[in-house]
């Protein structure tokens, strides 16, 4: 076992390992957990209680998670004098599957977001956001239940690569002058410039993850969302590389939408996943008017960022939107909201986002029975209208309960 300064490795757990390029999950896996700052303390406590209860019930005590606290954010700063200690990164890498609460991004001092840093240092290239409706939650659309999608958003490239130069800077002058002279462009000299790199490597590994997920979870289709009609060599290439990969690596499992019509008379052959593509702007309409025609979506970084929040809002559940950052094996599962400092330690906020991220984590581990149990326990609790303040204010006749009471109700409904 690795020696850590402040991390205590639980004696009753075994590490997750890799065999034949697959994760091997023991019955007592050690799962690193970053509690998080602010409301992280409230929601992580509740989430761990619910997950432990569901795992115990689903597997009759045969399986159990050995949680291992690792530190980032304010707690790490108190313990180590730094916000993201190396041993935290080492532990997340070593144990592969981790759960994370929200972290404060220290203001000033040139700090980068800890969340972004964690994703980059571990090369967690797929941001996974499932979006589905829980009956009873208030929604701005007529049929929120028709939307049940999982968005795979590329996490490392595109305009998020952070390559940009301010208007008037020496760098931007050089870039504009080179482009206008050598490449014969006509860029105004008072422009700021940002670079949008999208690679074949980055696109293919993301689409590979999305298709594999669709196969593993018996989903019906994978839609490549792009703006390739305008940005041909970045967004358009993302689509082309996506189809190329799908045909090369998953030929026996997929059929393209074109093939469905040209070869199969409009009927999808049994057991095949349809790979299709949509232009990004049209996709925003589609999730509103034909939501039930979509399943898994694979998107470049910016499209995915917009689409995740737009679709989460559509099911009324921004506060209940789960997320995961996944690399080749490492999965870091996290609430999508922040630390909401004004509610910290008040036992008040909704643990739903973190809890559903834990559900995603259980699915990633192949512990689907416990995952389903939590989902239906949460669903039932919402239908009984015993909910935290944020849901209560959109649900007429609901009873407001604390974070810990909400957790107790969910456990009672498992
Ligand atoms: P925030 O923490 O997400 O909170 C904004 C608002 O969202 C809250 O005031 C609350 O709205 C609602 N909310 C968030 N989580 C909720 C929950 N679990 N239950 C019920 N309502 C919830 O955003 P912020 O105030 O802009 O950011 C605060 C800090 O979090 C910053 O330091 C930021 O850098 C950090 N942050 C971290 C992450 C991350 O770790 N992944 C993500 C985003 C932000 P009402 O007041 O209307 O009820």
Image: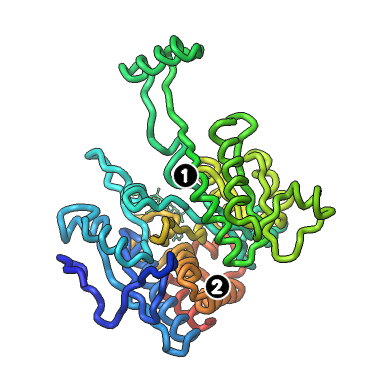
Q: Percent from the top left, x then y, of residue 56?
A: 44, 85
Q: Is the C-beta separation of discs 1 and 2 under 8 Å? A: no
- Of pointers 1 and 2, the one earlier in the residue sequence: 1
CA gap, disc 1 and disc 2? 32 Å
Check the picture and name the quadrant holding the N terminus: bottom left
Q: Which residue is drawn at 32% across and 46% down?
A: 113
Residue 278 location, quadrant: top right
Tag of residue 281:
none
Label 2 environment density (alpha carbons within 10 Å; few <14, some 14–19, many ≥20): some
Q: Percent from the top left, x then y, of residue 172?
A: 37, 19
Give the camera-side residue of 385 and 115.
115
Q: Residue furthest right?
A: 265
* Image vertical order of residue 324 relative to residue 367, above or below: above
* Image vertical order of residue 376 relative to residue 59, above or below: above
The answer to whether residue 71 is left or right of residue 297 is left
Q: Residue furthest top?
A: 181
Whether the residue carrying mark 2 lies under 8 Å from ligand 1 is answered with: no
Give the camera-side residue of 45 and 393.
45
Give the camera-side residue of 37 and 175.
175
Q: Residue furthest bottom?
A: 60
Q: Which residue is drawn at 53% across and 79% down?
A: 369
């Amino acid at each position: 076992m690795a020696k850590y300064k402040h991390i205590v490795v639980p004696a009753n757990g075994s590490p997750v390992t890799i065999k034949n390029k697959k994760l091997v999950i023991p019955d007592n896996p050690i799962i690193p957990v970053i509690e998080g700052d602010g409301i992280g303390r409230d929601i992580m406590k509740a989430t761990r209680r619910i997950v432990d209860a569901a795992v115990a019930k689903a597997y009759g005590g045969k399986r159990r998670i050995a949680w291992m606290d690792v530190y980032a954010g304010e707690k790490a700063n108190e313990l180590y004098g730094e916000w993201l200690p190396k041993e935290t990164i080492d532990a997340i890498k070593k144990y592969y599957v981790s759960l994370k609460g929200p972290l404060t991004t220290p203001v000033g001092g040139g700090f980068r977001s800890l969340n972004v840093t964690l994703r980059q240092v571990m090369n967690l290239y797929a941001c996974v956001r499932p979006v589905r409706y829980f009956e009873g939650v208030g929604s701005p659309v007529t049929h929120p239940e028709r939307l049940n999608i999982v968005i795979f958003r590329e996490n490392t490239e595109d305009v998020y690569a952070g390559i940009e130069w301010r208007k008037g800077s020496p760098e931007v002058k050089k870039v504009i002058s080179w482009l206008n002279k050598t490449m014969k462009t006509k860029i105004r000299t008072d422009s700021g410039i940002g670079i949008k790199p999208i690679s074949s490597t980055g696109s293919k590994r993301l689409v590979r993850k999305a298709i594999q997920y669709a196969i593993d979870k018996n989903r019906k289709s994978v839609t490549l969302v792009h703006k390739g009609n305008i940005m041909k060599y970045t967004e358009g290439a993302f689509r082309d590389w996506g189809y190329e990969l799908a045909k090369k690596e998953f030929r026996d499992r997929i059929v393209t939408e074109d093939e469905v019509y040209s070869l199969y008379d409009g009927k999808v052959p049994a057991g095949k996943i349809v790979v299709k593509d949509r232009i990004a702007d049209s996709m925003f309409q589609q999730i509103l008017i034909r939501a039930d025609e979509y399943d898994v979506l694979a998107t470049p970084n910016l499209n995915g960022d917009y689409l995740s929040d737009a679709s989460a809002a559509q099911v009324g559940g921004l506060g209940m939107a789960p997320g995961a950052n996944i690399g080749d094996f490492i999965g870091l599962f996290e609430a999508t909201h922040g630390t909401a400092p004004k509610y910290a330690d008040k036992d008040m906020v909704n643990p739903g986002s973190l809890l559903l991220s834990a559900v995603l984590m259980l699915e990633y581990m192949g512990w689907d029975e416990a995952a389903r149990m939590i989902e239906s326990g949460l669903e039932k609790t919402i239908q009984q209208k015993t909910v935290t303040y944020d849901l209560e204010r959109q649900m007429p006749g609901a009873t407001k309960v604390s974070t810990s009471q909400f957790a107790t109700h969910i456990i009672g409904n498992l």
